[in-house]
Image: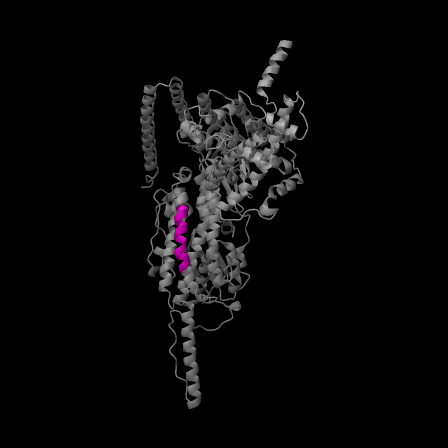
Amino acid sequence: MTATDVTTPQIQIPGVSVEQDTDTEDLVVNIGPQHPSTHGVLRLITTLNGEVVKEMEAVIGYLHRSKEKMAEGVSYFQYQPTIDRVEYLSSFYDHYAYVTAVEKIAGLKVPKRVEYIRMITMELNRITSHLLWFGTFLLDLGATSPFFYAFRDREEIFKIFEDITGARMMYNYYRFGGLNNDITPGWLDKVRYFCDWFPDRLDEYEAIVNKNPIVMDRTIGLGLIDRELCMKYGVTGPNIRAAGVPMDLRKTNPYCCYDEIEFDVPVGERGDVYDRYIVRMKEMRESLRIIRQAIDKIPGGDAAEVEKLRQAVAAKEEAAKAKAKETGEKPEPVPPINPDFEFKGQKINLMTYKPPAGEAYTTVESPRGLLGCYMISDGTPKAARVKWRGASFSNLAALPELMIGQLYPDLMAIFGSLDVIMPEVDR
Amino acid sequence: MVELVSVLKTMAVSQVQSYPDWLAQLFGFIGVSLPDDFLLFQWAVILFTAIAIVGQAAVVFMVLMERKVLAWLTQRIGPNRVGPFGLLQTLADGVKLLFKEDIMTRDQDKLLFTLGPALFFLPCFVVYALIPFTSELLAIALPTGALLFFALSSISVIGIVISGWASNNKYSLLGGMRSAAQAISYEIPLVLAVLAVVLYAGTMNIRDIIEMQNNGAFGFPFGFISWFSIWLFPLSFIIFFISSIAEVNRIPFDLPEAESELVSGYNTEYTGMKFATFFLAEYAALFAMGALTVCFFFGGYYSPLGGLLSETLKIDVILQSLIGIDGFAGLVRQLEMISWMMLKTYIFIFVAMWIRGSLPRLKPDELMGFSWKFLIPLSLINIFMIAIQKYWHVTSDLTFGLAWAAVLVLGVGGFCVMMSRHFTAKLEERFKPALT
């Protein structure tokens, strides 16, 4: 991941031309792997001329935990908890990619209610991820307070997640063909309450940050990413949308039930750091819009109502059985509940579950961009190969080229704006 | 020779405080009479010791205050474990730092590495000798007090540069260099803003400046009306306040120790008591700057209600009638003065903390640009305006005054229009789409 192909770095400070006649020595600063703003263990070997970056090399791999190889040693289900640890800020997405890959190979059909619950949880997770990005990005710029505000609001979503998954960050909730459990009664109301409560917070944050002269000075026109650069490095997600390309898998390649939902894809105008900030803030609002519609449209509605239906069907079945016992005839078939929200499959042992031989590649629009899972199954209980395509890796790859000729303090703004998470880069 | 000594002695007598009458009265009350020769340097040393102790206590309190205020701004509780309401937290931290290992790596310049914190610390506390906390709690009433204050406070930058260099750490080096650049840029508008005050007051003696703001010298006898913050337009005060925040290296100007960029800047390599020295000195400098803001622009130790409450309400007379003790008029007055001084200073310290909680950090080039392209021209214009105002005040020419007021209104209005147009154009240019 070097940027050595750029041989003559152009040093550009607006209005100043730097004369390079004097015999000066470059300063090589080894940023990281332990540094407050590398968001994990990233090492950036930076050559500085004064405070201008001449050259940069990103060294990755300090957090490599062989997550892909692990998939080949354990059963499909046993691998699932480790997925949470790959991308711990939005692990629902990784789970979705993994679970849908298995479903694709096995040809499992998923009830619509499950898809809606997956959609709601994923969009909530996008908000938590963007919120954390909001906090850390402004922390990189030097503002300390937004970090605490972001964490306070994430906590509200974590409470919502905890209700149904039992965990705050490591959810492990999706299952092949379904979910671990249905949502709890009243959960949708909590989500709806959050959707009403959160926009005020967003307004507040945007009031503090959007027109702040220091933020604008530090971000506008900085770290320009255009379409070509995105194609060169495979930059995706809000970063490419900020560059004016409306690439969003939820629109272009609808999975889940996104084709039934109305939402916009916010795009930027210039592709600078400020646009990436604006796009992410708008995406949070779009996520809220999606969640609101999903709550209204979810088949079966609240868990309590579904439970009532289930009990009614069970009572009918009981009655039919009792009647059959009296008369000695075969019990009358009871009409099942709507297949949209009831999945009645074969009971299997998850630990040894094996899809048939085959391969599948599934993609999902994670908060950081295109997240892909490529899976080869050879019919044994262990996957032959699982390959992840993490968005952070590709986004980080563009950093050295973006940094050439920029000032050292801009490194934090540009790197922060890419929203890179190191466990996903190193896996 | 004898002549020189006598001249020096006269100078010393004129510049150094003698003990006040109320103190003699107080000692007389408990039956001790002060010796007559106990008035020159001894009294100044005692005063400075008292002020330094007050300063230390203020700094220790400020560290806790900062943490509490930031906690309040970010919806947290803040330290509340050590002592009631966490009051002893700073002491506990200090004790912890005192017992920490003092780490020095092999390649560091040991002498300079040790000298750096001391050089940073000393000027920050010496300037306390020049701040009048009351009319008498003032170690040296120097005729050039304002000048010496800034001369001393700029020495502390050398301490930062030295420790940045001696740390043998690239982050520290960058922090030290940034600090030097920042000090050069921001001392100028700072001093220019004070120059306007000095020009108008006609003296550099800080106590005289305070007295001028309160004795109704400008025809307005009522309290805060005659404060320089109002009388000299808020412009001087705004320039001074922005520059003083930059001078004490606080967010949004905390580039020398920018945490997200330079880890901890010039104090990255410091541990234990050396780190604590930096820490204390930073807060001491903030306190001194807050106190100086009050002295120059907000009437120092005087009440904003005009004069002092103890003079109006005659608290000493009430005391005398209640418990029958005479001679406390001076003491009551001094206590009231120091209360007002502290209250006003802490208001400005709170504002600085508030700013720290709300703003991001500037970039070095923007920092320089803001000072050289905006603050310095503005402070030159400010000095020009105040010079004309001073001329008007000296001559008391009504026609000139009216003409000046008209010019001022037109000029300020035109300036505002110009600036707003400039910034609108800049904004439009900024938001112009770069992509085609």
Instruction: Tell me the chief SS of the magenta region.
Output: helix
Q: Residue at x 66, y 22 (%)?
A: B38
Q: Which residues are magenta?
A: A192-206
Where is residue A368 drawn, in percent x and y? Answer: 43, 51
Locate residue B5 relative to residue A327 in the image: left or right. right
Q: Residue B141 falls in which quadrant of the image? A: top right
Q: Is residue A1 left or right of residue B426?
A: right
Q: Which colouring convention does the figure follow? A: one colour
Q: How many marks?
A: 0
Q: Front-most of A407 and A356?
A: A407
B284, above or below A378, in the image: above
Instruction: From the top left corner, tell me how far across and down residue B302 is, in percent.
Output: 50, 30
Magenta segment includes A199: yes
Pick out the residue farthest to the bottom. A327
Quadrant containing the N terminus of chain B in the rendered view: top right
Quadrant position of the C terminus of chain B in the picture: top left
Residue situated in front as seen by the camera: B201 or A318: B201
Vertical placement of residue A27 versus A194, above or below: above
Reply above or below: A203 against B388: below
| x, y percent for residue B303 | 48, 32
Q: Answer yes or no: is residue B413 visible.
A: yes
Any part of residue B267 in sight: no
* Residue B41, position as x, y percentages in the image: 64, 22
| The stretch drawn in magenta includes residue B372 | no
Q: Is residue A260 above or below residue B315?
A: below
